[in-house]
Image: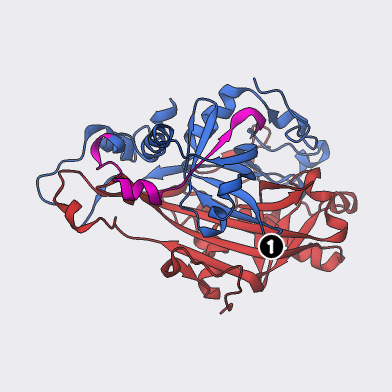
Chain colours: A blue, B red
Amino acid sequence: MSAPTERTALNRIPEKGVYDREVIDAILDEALFCHLGFISEGSPVVIPTIHARHGDVVYIHGSAGSRMLKHLRRGFEACLTVTILDGLVLARSVFEHSMNYRSVMVLGPAREVTDHDEKMVALERVSDHVAPGRWRDARGPAPSELDKTRVIAMSLSEASAKVSTGPPEDLEDDYDLDCWAGVIPLELVPGGLVPDPRLRPGIPAPSDLLAYADPAGPFRSKTE
Amino acid sequence: MSAPTERTALNRIPEKGVYDREVIDAILDEALFCHLGFISEGSPVVIPTIHARHGDVVYIHGSAGSRMLKHLRRGFEACLTVTILDGLVLARSVFEHSMNYRSVMVLGPAREVTDHDEKMVALERVSDHVAPGRWRDARGPAPSELDKTRVIAMSLSEASAKVSTGPPEDLEDDYDLDCWAGVIPLELVPGGLVPDPRLRPGIPAPSDLLAYADPAGPFRSKTE
């Protein structure tokens, strides 16, 4: 349980705020990428990038552009947000339309990971977060590649989740309207394994990858 | 064509930067929600919220919490980012792993929409962006609901897109490795219409909504 800080306390819809680390961790682990916000020359910038959680730390792959790298030496204040969209909530009034989603916001200072061993652990986590077994199967980073790769770390000490589920909640009078209401569930579905056109013949896909990419399979098995 | 400004010029991977308004518009129109970044008490904050484009303006539904509303009276610098994840790119080296995605970043001042007519147009766009026909079918906003709803507008004058597609690009030597490589395509798929448990009998779903929510149908027909 992360205690809510003044900044993570959610004061608009308090019933949606969740500080339970199990909930926060599950959302971070399921989301395939994040949006990282930071301040560049006085203005906010939000970039999509890849992350992975390791215990109480979330690691962010710093491929996200030179804008962010400028700030790395001295550390910087950041906000990492992940959002999993679960459905569209269609109410009987325009005002009550909403979305079902699970979101996590991590606030706090971001630091560059420079220790070799921590950097390797972080890259392993990020790699296997994208798809299982890639750290095992793909060629590991050469020293020059490791130098070019930036890894950023944020603590989960200031983290909160928001979870919205269920059918629309209409004003009592509106339930009499002749308007269809309900939910359109949404799911991110993998489309199987599409081999690289340059894949050499006779290289089978590993079974864990096949299962992961199966449109009918448990895509998010890493969290289940 | 938006001319790149100093801030939107993408200097890390220039080949991915796109300033073509048709590309930018299509991504904004397809993405169901955005992440909005702004500065609150000196720190960056990134929140998920709903948006819709109307000509050269992107409207943002300001349900996103009191943190943002504090800034509204005087306007504020913001960064709106949308990202559509299209696939996981599994290379033969850990270093070359990446994602296929389409992303748009809109920078600039955000203003609150206070003009009644503009606000109604914005809400219509946002409503029908979530699902077709909702503005037509659902009860429109009552004056008190309209007062409670904040709408924010950003110009598309400082907007850029990044598009990444295709198979992995490995180092020439790595193509000899015994490592499976390719792409896992990803798609956000609707799961049909799930009626509200309190839906009165005899209210059919409109045909455009049925088609939109059909798992085998053209979910993103609004952009096609």
Please tell me which residue is depicted at 65% across the width and 61% down the height of the picture. B52
What percent of the width, then of the height, locates residue A203?
13, 44
Residue A55 position (above or below residue B20): above
Which of B50 and B163 lies nearest the eye of the viewer?
Answer: B163
A152 vs A89, left or right, is left
For residue B218, above or below residue A8? below
Is residue B72 shown to the viewer in this render? yes
Q: Is residue B176 located in the magenta-colored stretch of the structure? A: no
Q: Nearer the viewer, residue A212 or B175?
A: B175
Q: Which residue is drawn at 81% across and 36% down?
A: A172
Residue highlighted by disc 1: B125
Residue A36: % across, % down? 58, 47
Provide residue A13's location: percent of width, then percent of height: 77, 35
Instruction: Give the residue displayed 61% in from the left and 52% down from the top.
Output: B33
Please provide the residue range marked out in magenta.
Answer: A136-162
Residue A75's image quarter?
top right
Kindly identify the amino acid type of the residue bearing the numbered disc 1. Arg
Q: Residues within 10 Å of mark 1 (few under 14, many from 20)?
A: many
Figure disc tally = 1
